[in-house]
Amino acid sequence: MNHSRIYLSPPHMSGYEQSYVADVFASNWIAPLGPQIDAFEKEFSAAVGVPHALALASGTAGLHLSLRLLGVGPGDDVVVSTLTFAASAFPVIYQGAQPVFIDSEPFSWNMDPQLLARFLADRARQRRLPKAVVLVHLYGQCADLEPILSLCDRYEIPLIEDAAEALGSSYQGKFAGSFGRAAVFSFNGNKIITSSGGGMLVSSDADLIAHARKLASQARDPVPHYQHSEVGYNYRMSNLVAAVGRGQLQVLEERVAARRRNFAWYAEHLAGLPGIKFMPEAGWGRHTRWLTCLTVDPAAFGADREMIRLALEAKNIEARPVWNPLHLQPIFSQCESVGGGVAEKLFGQGLCLPSGSSLTEADLTRVVETIHCAARSIS
């Protein structure tokens, strides 16, 4: 095969990273903490409009710390979006609690506020409300926060935003991650910016971040010797990783613009194909198009999503199905779920196209032509 591989969402370095990394090596301040972490936390806090930030080894670590600090424990229920990656729910299990999965709505593919309202009203009558809500902002688009926040306020349930996929997205003029009691972001290699790994926990609650900072550093007490009064974790980010993150953060808006241009290209050049619909951009904010996602109606297109994915793979182009809903996963088979039909249909028909911010016009043309060829071979 002559064509180089087109990846779904590869890292895209800015060139600024090298200077920060060089400072790390020059100072020999590699790990665990250091001035790059301090600066990264301050700059990230300003970028998302939340006053306090904690750099961590992963976004999952941030979710785990948030749940623990909000008092989630054995016997508790935690509401989680069902159309997401399993890492949104695993920390609930870490705490000995059980996730309850809520279906998506079709306007943003995120948690359905009406289903959540009915579920919480029923649980209020039973006097067994969930301990928290983990709301995922999917594929770069905020969920409908206003009604969900209203419900959480009414029932006094803390909201945690899982914004791992949504850095740079907005809702009614405010950035994702600035609404809940806490929010988490991811810097994995496939995200809109990457530090090679790692994540960030943000909150307006200074005490929550301070306690999370202690827990993330093995919960060492502030004394000269090693003393521990509570269980901690090895969750801190290294100074070296933070240096990469700082270089990436400088070009966040450029990366968002590039991914939105990718989407616009796909939308224009696939517009004539029957049965193809793109993930909508809800009217309440900016969708970063971290990934360009579409659905394929097999009756109209003549082939299903998997046939298109395999056609792309045959041309050395990576594409993936949308998330397999968590309520369908074997590990969560005993968990309660509310609805599910919308997420199941999206999984059955949904496909994520290559969306990296470094894609060239030639790359995009290859993807589009392959999909058109698949359509012609069927007709």
Image (spheres, rainbow, N blue to C red):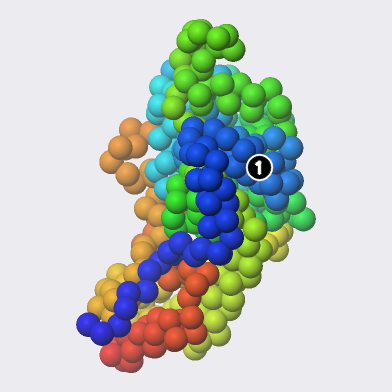
Image quadrant containing the N terminus? bottom left
Observer-nearest residue: 317 or 72?
317
Image position, residue 135 (x, y; %): 57, 42
Picture quadrant where residue 182 is located: top right
Left or right of 314 on screen, residue 182: right
Q: Residue 107: x and y, percent?
A: 60, 61
Residue at left 32%, top 44%?
Answer: 329
Q: Amino acid at mark 1?
A: Ala
Q: Secondary structure at mark 1?
A: helix
Of all residues shown, which one is farthest toward the front? 26
| Res. 203 visible in picture | yes
Bin the neighbour count of mark 1 within 10 Å (Cα to Cα): few under 14, some 14-19, many 20 and up.
some
Measured along the vertical axis of the image, is residue 350 above or below residue 66? below
Seen in the image, is 372 located left or right of residue 3? right
Residue at image mark 1: 39
> Residue at 58% of width from left, 72% of height from top?
258
- Give the farthest residue toward the left: 1
The C terminus: image quadrant: bottom left
Name the foreground residue: 337 vs 58: 58
Q: Dividing the picture into quarters, in which one does residue 255 lie?
A: bottom right
Which residue is depicted at the point 42% across and 41% down?
Answer: 87
Q: Residue at x 51, y 15 (%)?
A: 220
Q: Is residue 69 above or below residue 103?
A: above
